[in-house]
Image (cartoon, coloured by chain):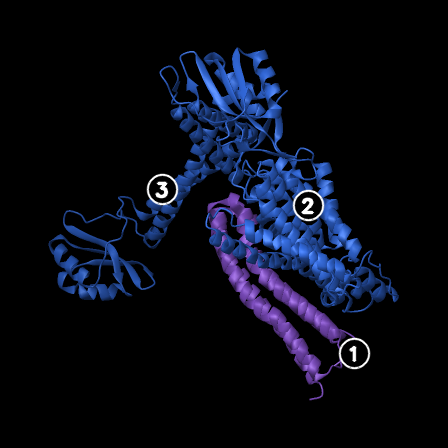
Amino acid sequence: MENLGLVLAITGAAVAALASGCGSAVGVGIGGEAASGVISEDPSKFGKVLILQLLPGTQGIYGLLIAFITLTQIGVLGGDSNISTAKGAMYLAACLPMAVVGLFSAIKQGRTSVACIGLVAKKPDQFGKAMILPAMVETYAILALLVSILSIVGIGGMSI
Amino acid sequence: MAVVPMQRVNICALKKDRKQILEALQRKSVVEICDVMKEGQVFHKDDVSDTASQLSKNIQTGQKALQILDEYAPEKKPMLAFLHGRQEVSVEEYNLFRKIHPTANKIVRRLTTLEKIVITDRAEIIKNKLQLEAMEPWVTLDIPMNFEGTDSTGAFIGILPGAWTDEKLVEILAAYGPVETKIISTIGEQTCIFILGLKKYKDKIFDLLRMNGFARPMNLSDLSPAFFIENLNNENQKLEDEIQKSIKEITELSQKRDMIQFFVDYETTREEKYEVINRLLQSEHTFILTGYIPVTETEGLKKYLEANFDVDIQFKDPSPKADVPILLKNNSFASPLESVTEGFSSPNKNEIDPTSIMSLFYYLMFGLMLSDAGYGFLMASVCGFILLKFKKMEESWKKNITMFFYCGVATVFWGVMFSSYFGDVVDVVSTTFFGKTVSIPPLWFSPTAEPMRMLVFSMALGVVHLMTGLIMKFVQCVKNGQLLDGIYDAIFWFILIVSCVFVLMSSSMFMDIVGLTFILPAQVGNIAAVIALIGAVGIIAMSGRESKNKGKRIMKGMYNLYGITGYLSDVLSYSRLLALGLATGVIGTVINKMGSMSGSGVVKVIAFVVIFCVGHTLNFAINALGAYVHTNRLQYVEFFGKFYDGGGRKYIPFSTKTKYYKIKEN
């Protein structure tokens, strides 16, 4: 297993994209169900509920981002892809915050979005507030993203 | 640059001028009507809700008529119709409509009638077709369906389940012969039969047939099936003709679409007016109207009304307790963001309008989060083009588009600073297609290469934003004559946070972590620590000042000091500037990379262009949405959280809320 480092690192990248992607898919999915209900009553609210539906979609993108940075760092997308086992394990660990927080925050954010879609259906003028509530959940995904990015970039500079 | 001061206005005028005065006020839309005076001996409110409800019924039928036209004779709307704005008409034209009004009303009603005809006829045709289907198996029978026999015979027309033949029928009826049987048709598992027997056996035959499951057909007409079918077909043809005629008439009437739209607007305006009349205090010959008017409009209104009517118009400052509506007025840079402020809440009367201070941060932060010169340029140029091309568009659209124009400009600024042009398209294209790497160096630094530096910058910007919020709070307190409150609740915190930043900047450990090379001398750090202590003591001593009990006051103060953790999380929250900024750049890079990886030669160029267009469109859409949402969040939660509660009532003047036409004051 001389390539164990690489295996671990790619596992990390894959998990980041996979888990946050799943979370976002669930979040956007339940958002879409609620949104289509509102549109069936009032098609003119499409723009507003679409934005609310899309809010939980960002976690998937953050996951992709982490996966991509990892892949670039370990040289899979061109370059030297020879890394030590320890380094590979570190990449895996660095990917985990985004993977786990991304998964759960996206689902919870989706549920908040659903509630806010209901809010917009009843009170369209409260759109500004309805948009902020799901965005509060996303804060934690952003913090996880931050930790993952900083770790991955930091690991790249280490010589282990 | 702030909340526009309001004045109370009282207008007393003659009843004969009521219509003209109200219509003038409605067109000028500078007065928000409010009724504060009570009904008395002389002044009463007039109940005109009957007329108002008639008008709202007219509006509904008018809208229904327009829907019908859209369904049967759709109008070809130009692309981006909403940008053209409402068509303008003069007051004279508007007034002339009174003559056309009955015609328009008639057309509207005619349209609803025609639609009803079409709908009922269509239903009738379907019903007939069902009957035709049921009659189909009987078509060869040449006697009426309800034929029951002659003086000495009895006839049975009906359906038997299962397959039957003449022989089989004769066989079961052998006891009551002679009988004449005829199989009319066989459909599926049913047989349509005709049996003629002797009258004296009629009941017996019927019982026997019933035992075999005999059922009479649904439709017992006195016509023979062939005639019946022909009649129905003729009727359907007639109905079809009528439908075609009605649709043709609807299509012809669609040329009057403008008139119907005007009708809807006209009735909407009148309905609005009648709602106001409902609230007016009226005596036998006069009426009184009260409301709020922005100070800037008072002179113009007074001049206009006094020149044209016999009126008494007075202005006075509203009482401090009054629930004065809030109108925001800002310069053209900040005014697009008024809707953002109002989306949170209009300021209450003790607060200042935060829009103008917020605007600079808003554009900057949006730009930082999108941070791509290519996207910014697209956004700014499209918005700029729309603003130049469609000058007549509605005010709200104009404000939104102006907002995105400035956001785009800010995005270009940061994109150039950080060297992001559609991700790294310059590098990729030059390397892949020309074999030589050309890159535009960032004007400042590249966040992808130095994320830590970007993080520090984001948080520093956050501290500045938060401190601006505290200063706003102080200004607000001073304005309300609560200088001490301002010092205790804003300045102490300001001192504490700023000096904490200085303390951190003199610590070599912190500076190492954030990767800054300079360091403040230790003395500065010590002085800052002392100042921070003063701030902290001030907060402990003063923030619980409403408690009389000294011990409780100190406890409360210490609890409030614990609120500093809130500032910490607020500052961390600005790390989203880095995260979203990086997201745009890195995904852009991924797209470019994917584009450059496939094929060779011409195919490669085509693949690159396709992937580039699709990918960057998606990336732009998602990140622009993210930037918009999170910029709002930073303003609402972090910035407004420091000083702004809102809760004011938005100023909604008495105006013409028309949909299709704009009445222009000459």
Q: Quadrant of the C terminus of chain B?
A: top right
Q: CA distance from mark 1 to mark 3?
A: 87 Å
**Residue at left 50%, top 38%?**
B67
Q: Can residue B271 be seen by looking at this rendering?
A: yes
Mark 1 Cα-neighbour bin, 10 Å: few <14, some 14–19, many ≥20: few
| Of the pair B299 and B57, the residue shown nearer to us | B299
Residue B591 in which image quadrant = bottom right
- Residue on which disc 1 sits: A80
Give the residue pinned by disc 2: B404
Mark 1 lies on a secondary structure that is: loop
Residue B478 x, y percent position in the rendering: 61, 38
* Residue B327 picture location, percent across and down: 58, 33
The quadrant of the picture occupied by the N terminus of chain B is: top right
Image colour for chain A is: purple
* Dot 2 and dot 1 within a common chain: no
The CA distance from mark 3 to mark 2 is 66 Å
Q: Residue at x 55, y 39 (%)?
A: B346
Between discs 3 and 2, the one toward the N terminus: 3
Q: Name the front one of labels 1 and 3.
A: 1
Q: Are both tags, 1 and 3, on one chain? A: no
- The residue closer to the viewer here, A138 or B96, is A138
Mark 2 surroundings: few (<14), some (14-19) or many (≥20) residues within 10 A? many
Describe residue B218's horizontal placement relative to residue B465 as left or right. left
Q: Position of residue A145 (x, y in %)?
A: 64, 65
Q: Chain of mark 1?
A: A
Q: Note whether residue B97 is visible.
A: no
* Extreme residue in the left direction: B200
The amino acid type found where label 2 is placed reads Phe
Colour in which chain B is drawn: blue
